[in-house]
Amino acid sequence: MTTATASRIDTAAPNTDRIGRGLAVVAALATTVAFVNGIMLTLNAPDDRLFIEGWRVSSFAIFAGLFALLAVRPRQSAGVWEIVLAGKTALVVFGLAIGDVPEARLSAVIDIGLVAVVAAAYVLCRGWLAWRPTTTNPTR
């Protein structure tokens, strides 16, 4: 593929790119809210839940950071889109499978929303292009 072709592909549909990045920002902000709420839950957690609440809070921080990374560099993060989608999809499946366990249903519903938002952002930002060899175009 020539550089001209690669540049044309990389700069195609700037509006969809902005929308996709905006969706990634929404996911990052929503996860940051969950992180802050998780801190409050951890501070008030009984001793037998302290570790699991701390683990969950750290996961919120990691996912918020990954969503922010995808918003800033959607086509320079090979594998990140796919890891985030796989991780959130696994949580949805697990949450639906265990059913009536406290928090499982609500978490599954929230994660279904996140999967939909991130999948839309992936398509709009053309996240799969992160796997292509780099070009001379710095906007990749």
Image (cartoon, rainbow, N blue to C red):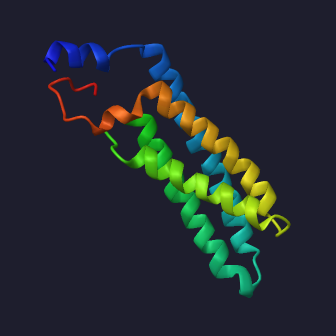
Horizontal arrangement in the rendering, residue 63 relative to residue 35 (left or right): left
Above or below, comparing residue 60 to residue 122 in the picture: below
Q: Position of residue 47 (x, y in %)?
A: 72, 87
Image coordinates for residue 123, horizontal then vertical, percent = 49, 29
Q: Quadrant of residue 13?
A: top left
Q: In which quadrant of the rendered view does residue 120 lie?
A: top right
- Identify the image quadrant of the N terminus: top left
Vertical relation: 72 (above or below) 36: above
Quadrant of the drawing holding the C terminus: top left
Which of 69/85 is in front? 85
Which residue is painted at 37% across and 48% down in the image?
79
Residue 62 in view (yes/no): yes
Q: Is residue 74 visible?
A: no
Report whether 102 appears left or right of 89: right
Task: State the residue at coordinates (74%, 56%).
Answer: 107
Q: Between residues 98 and 71, which one lies in front from this camera angle?
A: 98
Front residue (pair 77, 51): 77
Q: Quadrant of residue 113?
A: top right
Residue at 40% in and 48% down: 80
Give residue 44's position: percent from left, percent from top: 76, 74
- For the view shown, which residue lies furthest in the bottom direction? 47
> On screen, 15 above or below 24?
above
List the single residue furthest toward the right.
100
Residue depicted at x 79% and y 64%: 103
Task: Tell how many labels.
Answer: 0
